[in-house]
Image (cartoon, grey):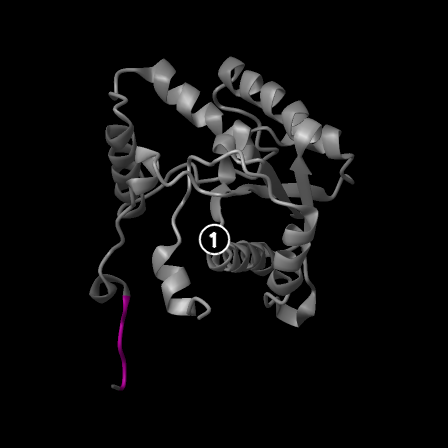
Amino acid sequence: MAMSVSEAVTRRRSTRAFTDETVSEERLRALLDKALRSPSGGNLQPWRIIAVTGEEREALSGPAAASLMANPTGDDEGYPIYPKNLADPYRSRRFAVGESLYAALGIPREDKMARMAWLASNFSFFGAPLGLFFVTRKSFGHHQWAHMGMLMQTIALLAEEEGLGTCMQEAWALVRPQLRERFGLEDDEIVYAGMALGVPDRKAPVNGWRSERADTSELLELRGF
């Protein structure tokens, strides 16, 4: 029996350890053929996907990690991952999830180098053999950028159905100039985010960690019920 949507949503998590089992081009194409039915306003389909594996993956990973270690603030080309002055409750949520993850990894807060090294492991796709990059345009509005997230979520849920794991990787925004050069992007194009895709390592402790969510009552306002 195929996995239900509810089960896929419930089971999906950010996978941060993968086996070395490859994902074939055929399997990737079959997944994306379905995922590209993801909705977008006006059917603009404001995305382009670049998939990397093998030597191309390796050519990206090392330089990106070295760049971040040398310049921890990175270069997001003026499109930051988070607002400069993030207010509560969002700031508190971000802090809490970071502390929870590092605690699960056994990395103390004062060990800045270990934390930076863990962040840099994004650029090896946490060991996943396949990486996806989502390209959109700077000239698009907020709605089109939101649609990119809808596509990524659709891919993540379909991957779950296929027995694959994903990790959405905003960290790639910190090395956008390197990606721009490597991919030969047009001036108006920009890498929105990356994604690790592969077979989860079920034995890895980090994959047993899950982030918390606010209760529905905290986020839902009912009127006229």
Q: Which residue range is magenta in the image?
A: 220-224
Q: What amino acid type should be assigned to the residue bearing mark 1?
A: Gly
Q: Where is residue 210 drawn, in percent x and y?
A: 29, 45
Instruction: Give the residue drawn at x 68%, y 69%.
Output: 43
Q: Residue furthest bottom?
A: 224
Residue nearer the viewer, 133 or 55:
55
Q: Where is residue 223 drawn, in percent x and y?
A: 27, 81
Residue 221 painted magenta: yes
Q: Where is residue 136 drawn, in percent x and y?
A: 67, 49
Residue 100 image-quadrant placement: top left
Instruction: Give the residue drawn at x 55%, y 56%.
Output: 155
Please indicate whether residue 132 sits to the left or right of residue 8 in the image. Answer: right
Instruction: Give the residue drawn at x 48%, y 46%.
Output: 166
Residue nearer the viewer, 38 or 10:
10
Q: Where is residue 79 drawn, in percent x and y?
A: 56, 39
Please indicate whether residue 200 sits to the left or right of residue 177 in the image. Answer: left
43 relative to 158, above or below: below
- Magenta span: predominant SS is loop
Instruction: Give the residue drawn at x 65%, y 30%.
Output: 57
138 relative to 147, above or below: above
| Residue placed under numbered mark 1 in the picture | 163
**Residue 139 in view of the camera:** no
